[in-house]
Image: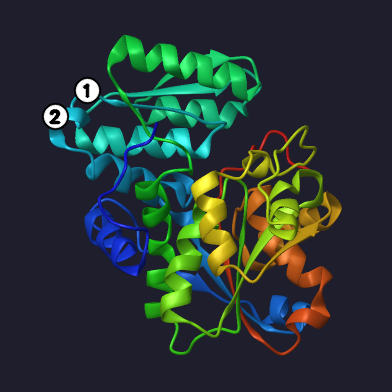
Amino acid sequence: MGHELPHPIDLAAVRRAAGRIAPHVHRTPVLTSHLVNQQAGCQLFFKCENLQRSGAFKARGAHNAVFSLPEKRRKRGVATHSSGNHGAALALAASGAGISAYVVMPDNAPTCKIEAVRAYGGEVRFCEPTLAAREAELDALCHQTGATFVPPFDDPAVIAGQGSCVLELVEQLAEPVDSLLMPVGGGGLLAGSAVAAAALWPDCAVIGAEPAGADDAARSFASGVRQSQLSPRTIADGLRTSLGALNFALIQKHVTAILTVDDADTIAAMRLIWTRMKLLVEPSAAVPLAVVLTRRDLFAGQRVAIVLSGGNADIDALPW
């Protein structure tokens, strides 16, 4: 249902995306912490997408999707289903393009994420918290409004846009890293980043980090067959979704490993980032650091980059 691009998802597509979205998104900083490095036993570089517009890396893919649509289609508006970050990012991109954005959200979505979609000018439609209900409501909405569906992750323009954060990271670091980690939910960030990293840092291990209670990507990667996410149980609300098909194909091709971690370790990592680095991150963003801290032997002495995916934590319901 997403819009096809005339080109494959390769480094050139990621570079085009980066150029297209440059006027609309932040070039986020890369930060380090001596204390966190000591605790992890390796040298860590944090790409701070929690400081991105709309508070997450999702702004990249959403802007690329909106601004790569033909003008005639773009004018009819865009629509999506999202538990939060993608919906807010799409609403922001649509407001920048002067068009409407319609976002179908589960009625149990975090209040802060519902408010964010509305703050950026998006129109929220609620549904039952199942994929079937989301898709039925979205179909009806697109039919009614003529809006184009912009998928949260399973879409060429979205994937290419997310990969732009690694283009920046490569420019910001003087030397390549040994390992690059980021969370994986639907797989847009991991797929796009892996495409860019494979071309620019060919010797770097690209690793997806996933909650043990929502481990469909790890199961898919291990079996070679895309597995569905049946009943995810994790504090990381951004990672409860199932891995996309297009994303899985790119991940199979370019990703080294997908590692899982328990929520207790994710909460500890999130707390460490808040207290030591003074950065507000949401649980999903802390999963990669939790992986590094619980598998210290794997990363000992390495240069490791982590994408802090977002900062949209529900501060009225913190996990501690």
Q: In this view, does 273 lie above or below 186?
A: below
Q: In this view, does 287 lie above or below 138?
A: below
Relative depth, front residue between 116 and 190: 190
Quarter of the image where the C terminus is located:
top right
Is residue 246 found left or right of 131 in the rendered image?
Answer: left
Q: Is residue 202 above or below residue 96?
A: below
Tally of marks? 2
Is residue 268 found left or right of 278 in the rendered image?
Answer: right
Please say whether residue 173 is visible from this viewpoint. Answer: yes
Q: Is mark 2 on a helix, strand or loop?
A: helix
Colour scheme in use? rainbow
Quarter location, residue 13: bottom left
How far separated are the C-alphas under marks 2 and 1? 7 Å
At horizontal 25% and vertical 61% (from top left) the residue drawn is 16
Is residue 261 found left or right of 64 in the rendered image?
Answer: right
At horizontal 68% and vertical 33% (from top left) the residue drawn is 316
**Residue type for callout 1:** Arg
Q: Which residue is farthest left?
A: 72
Q: Name the residue under label 1.
A: 76
Labels 2 & 1 near each other (Cβ < 8 A)? yes
At horizontal 70% and vertical 38% (from top left) the residue drawn is 228
Please say whether residue 28 is visible from this viewpoint. Answer: no
Mark seen at residue 218: none
Give residue 1's position: percent from left, percent from top.
40, 31
**Residue type for callout 2:** Lys
Give residue 44's position: percent from left, percent from top.
63, 78
Give residue 117's position: percent from left, percent from top.
44, 29
Q: Name the residue under label 2.
A: 72
Relative depth, front residue between 296 and 26: 296
Q: Badge 2, how many Cα within 10 Å: few under 14, some, many 20+?
A: few
